[in-house]
Each structure stands twice: as structure tokens, then as C-alpha cells.
Amino acid sequence: MIRMEGLTRKFGAVTAVNEVSLQVDRGDIFGLVGPDGAGKTTLLRLACGLINPTSGRVTLFGGEKDTGSFGYMPQRFSLCGDLTVIENIEFFASLYQIDKKTIKKRAGEILELTKLVPFKTRFADALSGGMKQKLALTCALVIQPEMLILDEPTFGVDPEFRKEFWRILYLLNREGMTIFLSTPYMDEAELCRQVALLDQGRIVAVGAPDQLKKQIKHKIIEIKADAKDLDFLGELPEVADASFYGDRYHVAVLAVEPAKAAIASVLAAKGITVSITEEITPSMEDVFVSLTEKAVSMAYGWVPQDVA
């Protein structure tokens, strides 16, 4: 449904998107994943035709005119705060010349889906952050699009809302809607069928989450200790990398048992008590760290021996 070929967008001396080629197929839940400043918003705006590429091309729905429709939900709430929920929906739908009877029917269905019925007469400015995101989604859905393009739809909202929002996306996808979204959350990458990892405007890797995890040559050891500053573990010859994740450390190693022994020895010598030291399945965060480091190394002409 979306095909990007050699897509590049420059803003003066800054290259926000650099030679990106991607394909989002019908029925996908496709996640564009990367940190702030990676180029996610620019890439989605290029896909929607809101800005023009410096070079490359984007093709929607096979390139034929009037063959499909999409709904776009920007990262920031951009509806009318002094209108009620239902007035926002009616106003947005009227821009597409949808008749009032159809608007009423569709609005009722979508408000049920998003659980906004009790709030339909509330002014948009009086909604919580999560409900504002639901309203933005509702307005994007009222035109009954074949595809939804969502820019960080759960950014800055509470975990319960994130779960509820993803429940809605899965329901829409089961009904045949294609979902193309961006997110800075690596745990949300796990919920997508296909993922593109974006870093500094470039695609680092594309594939299903399970496939991307298999690209990591390292094993991951998770450590929980009574000390938080364990960066010195990265200096051990048995350790390729050590990163802090919440209250735990993830240590990338080639051989688990020798690394465990070396880690136990150095922590004991420093008087640090360890409650967990176990091998775990790599997370998407581990995947991103591993693949972006490899990409940067190759870009500067240096490739670590273990990934060469």
C-alpha cells in the first residue's frame, strides 16, 4: 500500500531522511521505530504527501489515482479545543463532504469503539491526554480509510491508555485496516508484524521482531544488583557491551558461562550483591542497540571482529 524508493528529505544542511526504501503491505501493522530525532515524523509526512521529498519517490495504493484512502493522525493534538468531541468529529467529516446522516452513524460506531460516548459533549480542551489521542483517532477513522498512518500515537500517555489504544488498533487491523505507525517505544515494536529500525534518518534493519532478534550474534545476560553503576562491566574482555535498562543491566556476550564467571568475580571483588544473573531472550531494545552500533561502525570504516 506504501512503497518508498530512495526517499531523501533535506532541511538546509540537515538530512532528516536519508535514502529510505520501504514497503508497507496491505493488512500490515508496520512500526517505524527509533529515538527522538531519528526522522520518523518527517518520513510519515513524506508518506502522506504533506511535504515533498528532496529526492526519491513515494507510491500509495499502487500509484493509481483514487484507489484508496488513508487517515492521518499527527503526533500533536491538532483538533479544535473549543469544540466538543462530537462537534470535532462532525467538522472533520464535513471537510470530506460526508452527509450528516452518514456522519452520525459512523460517529456513533467509532465513539463506541474508542469508549468516548460518555464524553461526546465535552470540550476537547477539557479532555485528558489519552482521550485527546482517542478523539484524534476517531476523527481519522470517520472517513473509513483503508489505511491509518499514526505518528507516535501513544507518546506521553499512561501505560493503561497505551494498552487500550493498541487494543483498538488490533481490532481495526482484524477488520482489514492497514496500520503504519511510528513509536519511540521498543516494547511497542514487539506488537508490530513488521518493524523498520530508523536511526539518524537511515533504515538500520527491516523485518518481523522475531527475525530481527535472530540477527544478534551476542547472547544477553540480565543482571540485577544492589548497585546501579555497573558500566565497568563493559571493560571486561568477555563482555561486548553493557547497557542499563530500568533497574537492571543487559550485558551482551559471545559465551555465556565464561562471561558469568568473570562478571561474578569482578562484582564480588567490589562487594556488590547480585540477585539476578541469567541469560534472557534479546529485547527489541537490545536489537536496536546492537544493529545501530554495527551500522555506525561500518559507516566509519570500522567493523568489530564479532560482527564482521
Image (cartoon, rainbow, N blue to C red):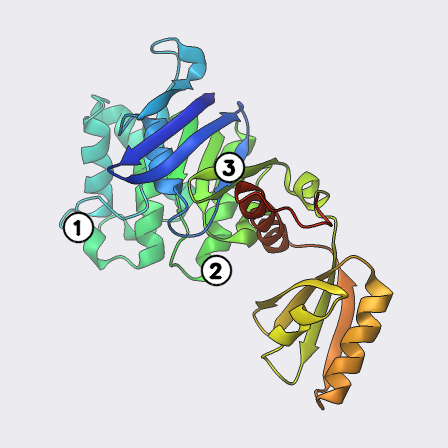
Which residue type carries mark 1?
Gly
Badge 1: few (under 14), some or many (20 or more) residues near its Cα, within 10 Å?
Answer: some
- Residue 46 pos. (x, y %): 34, 29
The dot on residue 203 is: 3
In this figure, which residue is indicated by the disc labeled 2?
160
Counting residues from the start of the chain, the first of labels 1 and 3 encountered is: 1
Query: Relative to the observer, which residue lies in front, 93 or 291?
Result: 291
Dots 3, 2 in contact, CB < 8 A: no
Q: Which residue appears farthest toward the top when viewing the image?
A: 64
The residue beneath circle 1 is: 81
At label 3, the amino acid type is Ile
In the structure shown, which secondary structural element does the residue marked by tag 2 occupy? helix
Q: Amino acid at mark 2?
A: Glu
> Residue 86: where, in percent of width, then height?
23, 42
Regarding mark 3 in the picture, which secondary structure is present there?
strand
Residue occupying image coordinates x 52% and y 46%: 167
| Residue in the foreground of this view, choosing between 261 and 247 | 261
Task: Say which of marks 1 and 3 sits in front.
Answer: 3
Between the C-alphas of marks 1 and 2, the distance is 24 Å
Above or below residue 111? Residue 277 is: below
